[in-house]
Image (cartoon, rainbow, N blue to C red):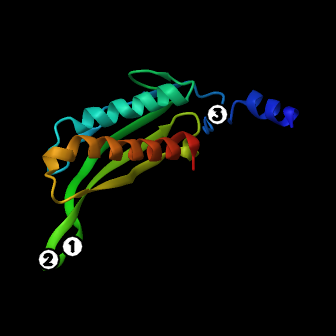
Amino acid sequence: MALAVLMLSSCGIYSFSGTSIQPDVNTITINYFEYKALKVNPSLSNDLTEAIRTQFRKMTRLEQVEMDGDLEITGEVTGYDVRASAIAAGDIAASNRLTITVKVDFTNRKHHEDDFSAKSFSAYADYDSNNTLDAVESSLCQEIVDKIVEDIFNATVAQW
């Protein structure tokens, strides 16, 4: 068992954080996620970009560089929608759902078989319709961003 762990960790492909980064990949560029959704949330692009950068800083050995990284993530927020998620008596919304959608391009300059383009990631959170979106928006967005960041991380370097 110890030999198997030693062999896996020495080849540099698997880590205990769940990543599968090839040993010749050392840098990553995470570009700013532009906001292209119709409904405006002025801080979402920055919050999402910083959350992705933080995740990669905490969970990988990759050095983050401004341009031309071995890996590159580019994306945009394409959807920010609120819809009723449950209807009560009298066709009144009992709860609402905030959904955020992002589109991501991923380039692995060393291993192009891992590349993907325009892949959509979406997550949502529900809230009681007695609350206004303004009252719960910050906490909902944080919850949704956390889910999306995890999905992007898994799709790019954990390859789940």
- When asked about the image quadrant of residue 3, the answer is top right
Q: Secondary structure at mark 1?
A: strand
Left or right? Give the position of 104 relative to 90.
right
Circle 2: residue type = Asp
Say which residue label 2 marks. 91
Say which residue label 1 marks. 87
For residue 43, say whether it is visible: yes
For residue 31, say whether it is visible: no
Pick whichever of labels 2 and 3 is earlier in the sequence. Answer: 3
**Which residue corresponds to the image point at 84% horizontal and 36% vertical from the top-left?**
4
Q: Which mark is residue 22?
A: 3
The one nearer the camera, 71 or 56, is 56
**Which residue corresponds to the image point at 40% horizontal and 34% vertical from the top-left?**
52
- When asked about the image quadrant of residue 47, the answer is top left
Instruction: Kindly report which numbered mark, 1 or 3, lies closer to the viewer in this rendering.
Output: 1
Instruction: Kindly report which numbered mark, 2 or 3, lies closer to the viewer in this rendering.
Output: 2
Residue 95, percent across and down? 23, 63
- Tell whether label 3 touches label 2 (CB within 8 Å): no
- Tell whether label 1 touches label 2 (CB within 8 Å): yes
Residue 144, percent across and down? 34, 47
Q: Quick check: 159 above or below 51?
A: below
Cα separation, mark 2 vs mark 1, equals: 6 Å
Residue 76, percent across and down? 29, 43
Residue 84, percent across and down? 20, 66
**Which residue corresponds to the image point at 66% horizontal and 34% vertical from the top-left?**
16
Circle 1: residue type = Ile
